C-alpha cells in the first residue's frame, strides 16, 4: 500500500479541522484602503487567525516583509483586539491570495493606513466568536463575559476558559458582521503601542535560514541570467554549445524577451547543478549584443541637455499662482540656483532571487516580492497561462527599498522553470546583476529663481524642473506634483517642467520622488531664508502660517484636497517640536560647526529634522547628531520598530548624501558593486539620532519612507552654516567632501 505524503498546507488543514480549533478567514475587498471587510464561511488554513486546542494562536501576516516590520506589526494589531497572550502567538507569512487577503504590498508606507482597521476587525471578530462560545457553554449572556490574555472570563460566576478549550465550539458559530464590532479604546491596548521585538529576530541574530536567498526545494537546479549591459540590448549570438559542454551544466539557452524591461528582458540563461557552476560558466560566455538606441545615452549628455533646456521656457507649466516674473522684478533680493541629484541604485543587501517549478501546466513560485500580486499577474501574462494556475508563496526579503516592487527577476525565474518543465530552479542574481540592472531612482535637475520682500519673507518661487519622459508623461518616479510644498504658501509661484528621453529603467526608491525633491526644495528654501536675513526654521514657520488661496486649476491635493492633503498645522507642529527638542537658537555655535533644518511631507507623514555637523578645512564632515520630529498619526503600533525605522532612514539618507551615485555611460551603469557605491558605515553615522513623535488625532500612517527625505537638506544646510559652502549637487563626494 503506497504511503501518503502530506505537504505542510494539508497538514495544517488536517490538524486544525480534524483536531478541532477555530479558523477565521477574512475576505477583504480588492481595495483594502476602503478599510472594510467581511467574514467568509470558508474555513481555510490560510485564514488570518487559527486557534488550536492547545491554546496556540497562529496569525497570518498578509503583507510582504522586507525589514520594515509588517510581519510583526500586523499580527500585533490582530492579537491585541483578540486579547491574545502574545507569548502564545505564532506568525507566518501568508501566501498570495487577493480574494482572501486584499492588497498585499510592501511599498509606499501603505501597510499601516490600509491595514489598521481591517486587522483590528479580524482580531475583534475572533474574540467575539470565542466570547459567544463560552457564554453559550455557561448559559450566560455574552454581554457579561470579558476576556483576559488568552481566556474568556465570566466574573459573576468566577469562571474562565482558555481560548484553546473553547475554539472548536467557536468555529461552529456564525461569524459576526465585522462592521458591528466594538473595538478597543486606545487605553485598553496591551500589545499595540508596546515595543515588541520582531518575530524573526531570534532566527536573524543566530544566522538561521530565513531569507529568500536561503530557500531551497528538493531536486532544485540553479540558474544565472546574463543580460546586455546596455539597457534594451538584445542577443545576436552566443557560444551556447561550449557552455553546455562544461561540467555540471544542464542547459543554456537564449531568451528573446520583450522590450518591456519590467517583464522579461532579453538574455542568456544558464542552468547548472550549483550556483557556482552556473556562475563559472557565465564567465565563459561570449555574446554578441545588439546594444540598441540606449547606447547613445549618458549622464554627461543628460546634464548638458538639461542646461540647454533651462535656458528655454518650460515645455509645460504644472502650476502658476500670481505673477512670478513680475514678482522677481519687484523682490528686495533675488536668488538664482541650479540643483542636481543623480540616479541611484537601491542596493538592498540581498540580491534578487526566486524559486520556480513549472509542471503539468501549473507554476509554483517562491519569491521576496514587494508586490507579489503584481508579480503573479506579470508571470501569467509572460508565460501565457491563467493566474489561477499559479501558486505564489511569500518569502522574507533581505531589504527592498522599492527594488522588489518590480518583478522582473520573478518573471525570469518563471520563464526558465517553464523551459525546464518539471524541475524546480532557483535564479540567483549577483551584486553586479543588481546594480547593473536596477530600476534606478531617476536623476533630476532644478533651475530655481526666488525672491524675498523687504521684510525677508518669501515673495516668489520659480522652478524649471528638467526630468525624464516622453514629453507628455514622466518616467516612473520622475514626476513632481502641483501641490509640492511650497506650492500654496508663496504668493507668486511657478512650476514648469521639461523632459528628456530615457532608455534607462527607473522605479520607486524609498520615499520615491521625495528623496530627491526634498534635497533641492528644502535647500533652496534655506537660500531664500539667508537672503532675507531670517532664521531658517522661523522662515519655514512663517511660510506655513500664510497659505495662499488655491487656484481652481492647481490640480489635486493642496488645501482643499481631502484627508490626505498637506496640512500646514501638522507641519508647523513637527517644526516646533524639533526646534524644542534640539534647542534650536538660530545662532552659530562655533567656527566650523553648524546646524541645519529641513522638513518634508511624504506618504502621509510629516517630518522635520535638525542636523548638527562640523566641517574642517579639508572638507572632512562629521554629523554629530540628528533630531527627528514626526507626525504619523494617533497610534505608533510598535514604538521600538518605529524608532529603528526612523534611525535607519536617516542613516540611509546619509548614504544618498555622501557617496551614492549611478553614472550612465554608453547606456549602462558604470558602478558595479559597493566599492564604487559605498554606503554609510556605523563609525560615520551620527552618535545619536533623537526621535520624537508628535501627539496627533489623525489616523495612523506609515513610516518606512517619510523619515528619509529631510536629512539630506538638513545636513547640507548645516554645512553652509559651518563653513559657508552651499551644496547644490549630490553626492557630496563629487564636491570634495568626505567623512571625518
Image (tube, rainbow, N blue to C red):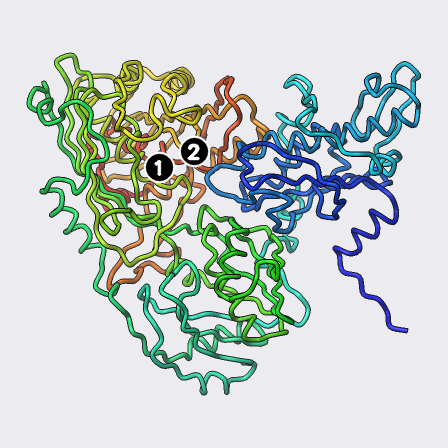
- Which residue was labeled with disc 2? 603
Q: Is residue 587 visible?
A: no
Question: Which residue of the protein is positioned furthest toward the top in this rendering?
Answer: 455
What is the number of the mark on residue 490? none
Q: State which quarter of the image contains the N terminus.
A: bottom right
Name the residue nearer the viewer: 112 or 126: 126
Q: Is residue 729 visible?
A: yes
Name the residue nearer the viewer: 161 or 651: 161
Q: State which quarter of the image contains the C terminus.
A: top left
Q: Is residue 246 left or right of residue 226?
A: right
- Position in image of residue 345 (x %, y %): 37, 52
Mark pair 2, 1: CA separation: 9 Å
- Which residue was labeled with disc 1? 514
Q: Is residue 734 left or right of residue 176?
A: left
First reached walking from the N terminus: tag 2 or tag 1:
1
Could you tell me which residue is drawn at 27 percent across and 21 percent down? Answer: 550
Name the residue nearer the viewer: 479 or 445: 479
Q: Secondary structure at mark 1?
A: helix
Q: Secondary structure at mark 2?
A: loop
Up the image or down, 322 lies above or below 705; here it is above
- Position in image of residue 120 (x %, y %): 65, 29
Could you tell me which residue is drawn at 23 percent across and 30 percent down? Answer: 720
The answer to whether mark 2 and mark 1 are in CB contact below 8 A is yes
- Figure quadrant of residue 533: top left
- Figure quadrant of residue 79: top right
Q: Is residue 653 left or right of residue 489?
A: right
User: Within 10 Å of the Cα at label 1, are there few (<14), some (14-19), or many (20+) other Cα atoms?
Assistant: many
Could you tell me which residue is drawn at 44 percent across and 75 percent down? Answer: 282
- Figure quadrant of residue 294: bottom left
Q: How many marks?
A: 2
- Position in image of residue 454 (x %, y %): 12, 13
Amino acid at each position: 500500500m503506497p504511503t501518503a505524503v502530506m505537504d505542510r498546507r494539508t497538514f495544517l488543514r488536517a490538524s486544525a479541522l480534524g483536531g478541532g480549533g477555530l479558523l477565521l478567514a477574512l475576505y477583504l475587498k480588492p481595495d483594502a484602503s476602503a478599510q472594510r471587510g467581511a467574514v467568509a464561511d470558508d474555513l481555510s488554513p490560510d485564514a488570518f487567525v487559527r486557534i488550536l486546542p492547545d491554546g496556540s494562536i497562529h496569525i497570518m501576516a498578509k503583507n510582504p516583509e522586507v525589514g520594515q516590520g509588517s510581519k510583526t506589526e500586523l499580527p500585533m494589531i490582530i492579537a491585541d483586539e483578540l486579547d491574545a497572550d502574545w507569548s502564545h502567538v505564532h506568525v507566518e507569512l501568508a501566501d498570495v491570495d487577493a480574494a482572501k487577503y486584499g492588497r498585499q504590498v510592501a511599498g509606499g508606507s501603505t501597510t499601516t493606513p490600509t491595514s489598521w482597521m481591517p486587522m483590528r476587525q479580524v482580531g475583534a471578530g475572533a474574540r467575539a466568536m470565542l466570547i459567544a462560545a463560552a457564554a453559550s457553554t455557561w448559559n450566560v449572556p455574552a454581554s457579561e463575559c470579558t476576556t483576559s490574555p488568552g481566556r474568556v472570563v465570566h466574573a459573576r460566576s468566577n469562571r474562565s476558559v482558555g481560548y484553546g478549550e473553547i475554539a472548536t465550539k467557536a468555529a461552529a458559530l456564525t461569524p459576526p458582521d465585522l462592521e458591528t464590532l466594538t473595538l478597543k479604546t486606545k487605553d485598553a491596548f496591551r500589545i499595540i503601542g508596546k515595543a515588541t521585538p520582531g518575530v524573526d529576530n531570534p532566527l536573524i541574530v543566530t544566522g538561521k535560514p530565513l531569507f529568500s536567498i536561503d530557500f531551497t526545494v528538493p531536486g532544485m537546479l540553479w540558474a544565472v541570467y546574463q543580460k546586455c549591459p546596455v539597457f534594451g540590448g538584445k542577443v545576436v549570438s552566443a557560444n551556447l554549445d561550449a557552455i553546455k559542454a562544461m561540467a555540471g551544466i544542464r542547459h543554456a539557452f537564449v531568451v528573446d524577451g520583450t522590450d518591456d524591461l519590467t517583464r522579461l528582458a532579453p538574455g542568456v540563461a544558464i542552468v547548472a547543478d550549483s550556483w557556482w557552476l552556473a556562475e563559472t560558466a557565465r564567465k565563459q560566455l561570449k555574446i554578441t549584443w545588439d546594444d540598441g538606441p540606449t547606447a547613445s545615452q549618458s549622464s554627461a549628455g543628460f546634464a548638458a541637455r538639461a542646461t540647454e533646456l533651462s535656458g528655454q521656457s518650460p515645455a509645460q507649466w504644472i502650476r502658476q499662482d500670481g505673477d512670478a516674473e513680475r514678482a522677481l522684478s519687484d523682490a528686495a533680493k533675488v536668488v538664482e540656483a541650479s540643483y542636481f541629484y543623480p540616479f541611484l541604485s537601491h542596493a538592498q543587501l540581498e540580491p534578487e532571487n526566486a524559486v520556480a517549478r513549472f509542471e503539468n501546466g501549473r507554476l509554483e513560485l517562491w519569491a521576496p516580492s514587494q508586490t507579489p500580486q503584481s508579480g503573479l499577474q506579470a508571470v501569467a501574462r509572460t508565460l501565457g497561462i491563467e493566474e489561477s494556475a499559479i501558486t505564489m508563496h511569500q518569502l522574507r526579503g533581505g531589504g527592498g527599498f522599492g527594488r522588489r516592487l518590480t518583478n522582473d527577476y520573478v518573471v525570469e525565474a518563471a520563464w526558465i522553470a517553464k523551459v525546464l518543465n518539471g524541475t524546480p530552479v532557483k535564479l540567483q542574481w549577483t551584486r553586479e546583476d543588481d546594480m547593473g540592472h536596477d530600476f534606478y531612482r531617476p536623476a533630476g535637475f532644478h533651475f530655481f529663481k526666488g525672491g524675498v520682500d523687504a521684510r525677508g519673507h518669501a515673495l516668489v518661487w520659480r522652478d524649471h524642473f528638467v526630468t525624464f519622459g516622453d514629453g507628455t508623461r514622466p518616467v516612473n518616479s520622475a514626476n513632481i506634483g502641483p501641490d509640492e510644498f511650497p506650492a500654496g504658501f508663496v504668493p507668486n509661484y511657478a512650476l514648469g517642467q521639461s523632459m528628456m528621453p530615457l532608455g534607462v529603467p527607473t522605479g520607486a526608491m524609498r520615499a520615491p520622488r521625495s528623496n530627491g525633491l526634498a534635497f533641492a526644495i528644502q535647500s533652496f528654501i534655506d537660500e531664500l531664508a539667508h537672503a532675507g536675513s531670517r532664521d531658517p526654521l522661523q522662515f519655514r514657520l512663517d511660510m506655513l502660517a500664510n497659505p495662499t488661496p488655491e487656484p481652481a486649476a492647481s490640480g489635486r491635493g493642496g488645501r482643499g484636497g481631502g484627508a490626505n492633503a498637506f496640512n500646514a498645522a501638522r507641519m508647523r507642529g513637527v517644526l516646533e517640536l524639533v526646534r524644542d527638542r534640539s534647542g534650536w537658537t538660530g545662532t552659530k555655535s562655533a567656527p566650523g560647526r553648524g546646524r541645519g533644518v529641513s522638513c518634508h511631507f511624504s506618504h502621509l507623514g510629516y517630518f522635520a529634522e535638525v542636523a548638527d555637523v562640523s566641517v574642517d578645512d579639508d572638507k572632512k564632515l562629521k554629523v554629530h547628531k540628528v533630531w527627528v520630529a514626526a507626525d504619523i498619526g494617533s497610534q505608533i503600533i510598535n514604538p521600538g520598530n518605529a524608532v529603528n525605522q526612523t534611525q535607519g532612514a536617516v542613516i540611509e539618507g546619509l548614504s544618498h548624501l555622501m557617496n551614492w551615485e549611478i553614472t550612465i555611460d554608453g547606456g549602462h551603469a558604470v558602478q558595479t558593486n559597493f566599492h564604487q557605491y559605498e554606503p554609510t558605515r556605523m563609525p560615520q553615522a551620527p552618535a545619536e539620532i533623537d526621535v520624537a513623535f508628535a501627539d496627533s488625532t489623525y489616523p495612523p500612517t506609515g513610516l518606512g519612507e517619510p523619515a528619509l527625505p529631510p536629512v539630506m537638506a538638513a545636513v547640507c544646510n548645516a554645512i553652509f552654516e559651518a563653513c559657508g559652502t552651499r551644496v547644490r549637487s549630490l553626492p557630496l563626494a563629487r564636491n570634495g567632501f568626505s567623512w571625518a
